[in-house]
Image: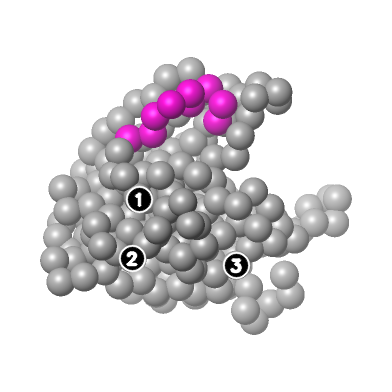
Amino acid sequence: MCTVIVRTGWPLTLMGVRDEYTDRPWEGPGEHWPDFPGVIGGRDLKAGGTWLAVNPSARRAAALLNGRGTAAAETTRISRGDLALRAAYTGNAPGGDLARYDPFHLVLAGEAGARLFSWDGERLSASDLPEGVSMVVNTGLDPASERVVAYLPRFRTESWSDLVRAEPSGEPGALIVRHALPDGRTFASLSALRVTLAPDGVTYDFADLTADRDR
């Protein structure tokens, strides 16, 4: 389960917390993709894409979360990792043959605000994120999510940087997670990337949440 937090307005602030298996290789933010010049993001070294992409010259960012619904066919499935790259680069909604992707949520943020695109394997829906601070999780813009119930009020009043420094937990409502699984693997919060889009430029702050722990 990953989390995206957005504070609308201008400047606009977006933070993505990435949860993944700790043995899945990745690298920190950079311009890793020649097909998307100028776009910055952390790269998943297994599939080649990203979970959060920033396009500084366009004052735009896009963040990807896995969704729930009907999975793509094994024979035609492709990685969702290009979705944030394309959105940040072009500013367009997800397009093409979406049936090749497993369900997802994609937040696209820029000067005009932030929109949430959700694909459940059959239908693409789109909505504007409300004014103020919102949290998007794997069930979408879900006020009943235990994580949202526990942390949305805190993101409205507390330092975002302090919140992502919390000790990892296996509790259902935890923001920073770490689970030891029966097969011996570990699923954990690996990184957090906070992006501020403003008239005078774009800033981002990357935190490797595994830096002081065994991956």
Q: Is residue 93 above or below residue 197?
A: above
Dominant secondary structure of the residues highlighted in magenta in the image: loop
Q: Residues within 10 Å of mark 1 (few under 14, many from 20)?
A: many
Q: Secondary structure at mark 2?
A: strand
Amino acid type, mark 1: Ala
Amino acid type, mark 3: Glu
Amino acid type, mark 2: Val
Tell me, for residue 195, which label it has, or none: 2
In the picture, measured across the screen, residue 46 lies left or right of residue 160, that is: right
In the picture, measured across the screen, residue 161 lies left or right of residue 49, that is: left
Q: Position of residue 23 (x, y in %)?
A: 75, 61
Residue 162 found in image quarter: bottom left
Name the residue rendered at 46%, 51% in the picture: 35
Name the residue rendered at 62%, 79% in the picture: 211
Q: Earlier in the sequence, mark 1 or mark 2?
A: 1
Q: Earlier in the sequence, mark 3 or mark 1?
A: 3
Name the residue rendered at 55%, 30% in the picture: 101
Q: Residues within 10 Å of mark 2 (few under 14, many from 20)?
A: many
Q: Position of residue 210 (x, y in %)?
A: 63, 73
Q: Position of residue 146 (x, y in %)?
A: 48, 47
Q: Earlier in the sequence, mark 3 or mark 2?
A: 3
The residue at which mark 3 appears reads as 27
Determine if residue 153 is in view: no
Q: Is residue 38 above or below residue 81?
A: below
Do the CB atoms of the residues marked 1 and 2 lie less than 8 Å apart?
A: no
In the picture, measured across the screen, residue 104 lies left or right of residue 187, that is: left
- Per the rendered image, the range of residues in magenta is 93-101
Name the residue rendered at 13%, 66% in the picture: 199
The residue at which mark 1 appears reads as 88
For the C terminus, give its image quadrant.
bottom right
